[in-house]
Each structure stands twice: as C-alpha cells, then as structure tokens.
Amino acid sequence: MANALVTGGAGYIGSHTCLELLQAGHSVTVLDNLCNSSQESLKRVQSLAGRALDLVQGDIRDFDLLRRLLDSRGSKQPAFDAVVHFAGLKAVGESVAQPLAYFDNNVLGTVCLLRAMAEAAVKILVFSSSATVYGDPASVPISEEFPRSATNPYGASKLMIEDMLEDLYRSDPTWRIGRLRYFNPVGAHASGLIGEDPQGAPNNLMPYVSQVAIGQRECLQVFGGDYPTPDGTGVRDYIHVVDLAKGHLAALRSLSQAEAGTGQLLTVNLGTGVGVSVLQLVKAFEQACGRVIPYRVVARRPGDVAACYANPHLAKTLLGWQAQRSLADMCADAWRWQVQNPQGYRLVSTPAPSTGATQ
Ligand code: NAD
Ligand code: UFG
C-alpha cells in the first residue's frame, strides 16, 4: 500500500483518482489551493470510499509548505511513496490572454514541487500531460513518438514540463516518472456524486451539451462543419474519467514495481483509440438523456484541429491498462451527474464524512 501525495486532488480528474486510490487501499493526502475546485468533491470521495483522506489547502508554489509536507520527520521512510501531480491551470483561451499566469502556476509550480521532492528523496511522480503536446498531428491515430508542438501557452507549459522531467531523469536516473498524455476526459463517477464542475460557461463539449440537455443553455454551437472528417465536425478521443483515473493506478503500480535503485521514464497516451465526432457525441448524449439537443453549426473555433485520437497500445503493453467504458457509459454518467447536481458542487450540503487533518 502506498502513501500518495496528490496535487490538485480536489479537481475533476484528481477527485476521481483519489477515490480509486482510496478504494485500492492507498493512503491519500491532497494538496490543493482550491482555485478551481471545492472541498465538497473530497467530502464526497471520502463518503464513497468509506475512508478518510487528508486535505492540505495550499499552493504547489509554496516551497516551505512542500518541504514541511514531504519532510519525513527524522524517520528513515520518506513521508510519501509517490506524488500524483494534477495541479495546474487548464483553460486554453485563458492561457492565451494570461500566458504568465500559466507559466507561473504550471511550470514554476512544478519546478517547486520537483525541488522539494528531490530534497526529500521522494522520486516517484505521475504527471498529467495532455494530447495537446501533439499540436496539429500529421495523421491519426497518434502514437507517443509523434512530433510535439505547442499552439498556445497552456500547451507550451505541458511541453516545458515534459522536457523538464526528461532532463531531471537524465540527471538522476533513479527517478521514476510517468508522463500520462490524456486525450479528452469526460463523464463522471457512476454514483453521480462526483463529476466535472466547470465555472461559468463550459469550454469543453460534453459539459456544454449536458447543460443544454438540462435546459441551462439554449443551444450548442458546433464549431465547424467543414473539417475533413466523415461528417465534417471535429473528431476526438473521449475517455471516461474513471478509466483515466484507473490509468494512474496502473502507472503507479508499474513505477513502484521497478527494481530497487532503477528508474524509469514512462510516456504513454491515455485514450480509447476511438475517434468520435461532435455530432456523434450529440446523438449519443440524446440517447442517454432521452431529450433532443438543439445545435447549430457555426464557424470553426480558432486553434482547433480536425481530428485527434490516440493509438492506445503502448499503455496496454507497458501498464496492462486499457479503457473499458463506452461512449454510452460516458454520456449516461455525465447525465446522471448533471441531473443530480444541476449547480455542480455549489449550494449543496451533504453530511461531512470524517475528514483528516486540514491545514
Ligand atoms: P481541474 O481544474 O478540475 O483540477 C486541477 C486542480 O488543481 C484544481 O483542484 C485546482 O484548484 C488545483 N490547482 C491549480 N493550481 C494549483 C496550485 N498552484 N496549487 C495547488 N493546487 C492547484 O482540472 P482537471 O481537469 O482535473 O485537470 C487535472 C490536470 O490534468 C491538469 O494538469 C490539466 O492540465 C490536465 N489535463 C486535463 C485535461 C482535461 O480535459 N480535463 C486534458 C489533459 C490534461
Ligand atoms: N466543440 C464544439 N462546441 C463547443 C465545444 C467544443 O463544437 O461548445 C467541439 C470542438 O470544436 C472540438 C470538440 O468539440 O471539435 C472537442 O472540444 P473540447 O473543447 O471539448 O476539447 P478539445 O479537444 O478542444 O480540448 C481538450 C482540452 C484541452 C486539451 C485538448 C487536447 O480541453 O485542454 O483537449 O488534449 F489541450
């Protein structure tokens, strides 16, 4: 059983991963500044798991805090076996408007975390990278060795961190690092208790569709009907967030099993390998919710690529992991979350399960 520090664990993917970690018997401490999340997600994670985790409310750029957290307090055992690093800002458009905020938070925050980990000799890290590092791919499906490029500061921050991790590994090959390139995470836990909680109008397709379905928004704008894809709309690789969370456990398992003293730099796509168009997703969602989703096709969104889906085979070979849940599952679970939580985590009061220390 591992003792994991999860940065950004209160967020969308982090909360689902914390639940999987707790259910697998691991101990979890979350470090999150709650800039894009709330404690409510973690209360629910604990209810679902029937076990407590610790929440430390703080920033990954606070080196003294990280030092204290990672300090083993004189024991020979490090305070944590591994760090799962989700904390970061993720809105592409915002990153274009505020590039320095993105480099500061994502890149400098990761430098700070890595320095504290190195000092405490905690050298197992799983990092949230993104399919955005493939830029506009020359072909699909996309394999890990495809060339990388950035089309916006958010993507640039992921590229920089990937490169930093590679340099760190080269300088000290006892590190065990997983760079997980997520495709398009969607859906929610099947309980309907945890899910994606966007602030304001959603940027991403699935939460937007879901808000149209429930009547909070009038009509979906389909960005572009003239792409060179089967129905002219953009094609993506949607992956259920629970499958994605399980991918982190598989990566942790693989990194932890490496022979003592040996390191590993693992870079894998986490996707399904199935390309789904905007209109296909709308149809699947209509079936899940039993309602018509009004939409109109408008101009392309600047910066969007026509098609982006993974070759997922390396993750299967190296981690023994592959996505299990279908597009119908993703839509059904997203819909259940939407119906049960029309305002996300806001304006709710659920009984607080027993919590760990909160700083
Ligand atoms: P999210 O915003 O729901 O979660 C990120 C969490 O990090 C939030 O709880 C936020 O409060 C916290 N955080 C941000 N900056 C912090 C800081 N400086 N210190 C401490 N906590 C901080 O996002 P998510 O969708 O769960 O994404 C998690 C990670 O996965 C991010 O790094 C994101 O870039 C990456 N990713 C997400 C997607 C996606 O579509 N959701 C796709 C590819 C990669
Ligand atoms: N789309 C619409 N209408 C909307 C929203 C999206 O038609 O209101 C379309 C987009 O044009 C695209 C598809 O739906 O064809 C998916 O768009 P998303 O915004 O849901 O996802 P993206 O693939 O554009 O972006 C996601 C993450 C980024 C990440 C990227 C690559 O949001 O952070 O995947 O991993 F960089």
Image (tube, rainbow, N blue to C red):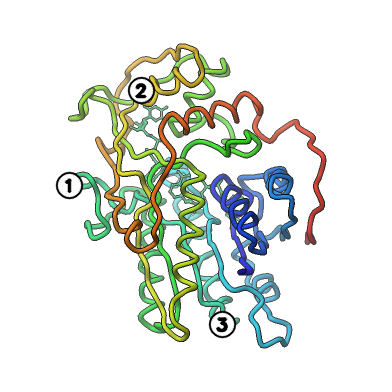
Q: Position of residue 28 (x, y in %)?
A: 66, 62
Which residue is painted at 35% across and 44% down in the image? 272
Q: Which mark is residue 222?
A: 2
Q: Which mark's residue is nearer the viewer, 2 or 3?
A: 3
183 is higher (above) or lower (below) than 313: above
CA separation, marks 2 and 3?
48 Å
Circle 3: residue type: Ala
**In what quadrant of the picture does the C terminus appear?**
bottom right
Which residue is painted at 42% across and 43% down in the image? 324
Label 3 sits on residue: 121
Q: Position of residue 340 (x, y in %)?
A: 66, 26
- Dot 3: element: loop
Q: Quadrant of residue 220?
A: top left
- Dot 2: element: strand
Label 1 sits on residue: 138
Circle 2: residue type: Val
Mark 3 surroundings within 10 Å by alpha-carbon count, few (fewer than 14), some (14 through 19), many (20 or more): some
| 302 left or right of 331 in image | left
Mark 1 surroundings within 10 Å by alpha-carbon count, few (fewer than 14), some (14 through 19), many (20 or more): few
Q: Is mark 2 within 8 Å of ligand 2?
A: yes
117 is higher (above) or lower (below) than 7: below
271 is higher (above) or lower (below) than 28: above
**In what quadrant of the picture does the N terminus appear?**
bottom right
Mark with earlier residue (1, 3): 3
Which residue is painted at 30% across and 37% down in the image? 304
Ligand 2 appears in which quadrant?
A: top left
